[in-house]
Amino acid sequence: MFKTLTMWLLLVLCEVLVVAAFFSPDSVVENLRREQRMTRASFGDVTEQHVRQAADGWFTSAFHDTGIVRHSFQLFIPTQEAREKSTGLEDLGSEAFPWFRRRMETVWNGIYQSLYRFSVLLEVLPFMLPLIIPAIVDGFMTREVKKRTYGYASPIRYYASMHAVAALIVAIPAYLVFPLPVPPLFVPLWAVSVAIILAVMTSNIQKKV
């Protein structure tokens, strides 16, 4: 399972690099606006406003007020004053610096979009816990019945569900950085999938693992 998680996390990292390299900051903003409209359509204006305010607060306190955003641009893009002081090198990188600026804008817009999606996740997930917890309890109870009635605990279902759980775990970071608009209903569908898979896994736990 650890190897499976590592593989999926590497794919997520590749996804982040692709977004930073090839997506424009304007496209990320437009995708975010589409998601906000979908969130309002799915959960209502009040919930969407609460989600957006939470994302704004996190981004402002963690990245803007601390100066991280400003320093990240200064690290890769020298100011006009610094370029003028570099006698003979004023035009060095004149074509590359605008490209770096656009990449940095894409990265920070993407970070805000991830915070917005994380806020959606936190908003919806508490309502899904009453579904997930009973599914786990039901799976263990089914396993106890199998133990006492000599029922069959399928190793195929057990190991398949373990890999499915690993995929569902990685689905969250993949969802947070996915470059295209994702309907907010992804979160409840993900929670239902988790509940079903955990019920299958716990009901087929092997005697010796």
Image: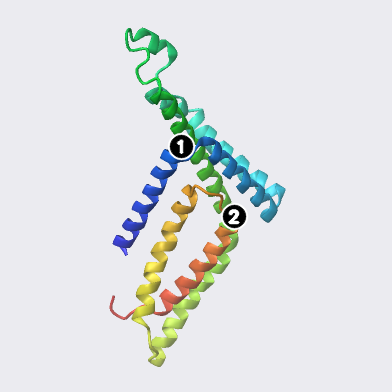
Which amino acid type is shown beneath numbered disc 1? Val
Dot 2 surroundings within 10 Å: few (below 14), some, or many (20 or more)?
Answer: some
Q: Of residues 139 and 14, which is closer to you in this image? A: 14
Which amino acid type is shown beneath numbered disc 2? Pro
Q: Secondary structure at mark 1?
A: helix
Q: Looking at the image, which residue is at 41% across and 66% down?
A: 165
Where does the N terminus fall, quadrant-wise? Answer: bottom left
Residue 82 picture location, percent across and down: 39, 12
- The image quadrant that residue 144 belongs to is bottom left
Q: Total marks drawn?
A: 2
Would residue 48 be found to the left or right of residue 132 on screen? Answer: right
Would residue 17 be found to the left or right of residue 177 on screen? Answer: left
Residues at circles 1 and 2 in contact by the CB criterion of under 8 Å: no
Q: Secondary structure at mark 2?
A: loop
- The image quadrant that residue 154 belongs to is bottom left
Residue 78 picture location, percent across and down: 40, 18
**Which residue corresponds to mark 2?**
183
Model colouring: rainbow
Dot 1 surroundings within 10 Å: few (below 14), some, or many (20 or more)?
Answer: many
Q: Looking at the image, which residue is at 48% across and 50% down?
A: 178
Q: Of residues 152 and 167, which is closer to you in this image? A: 167
**Which residue corresponds to mark 1?**
107
Vertical comparison of 17 with 160: above or below: above
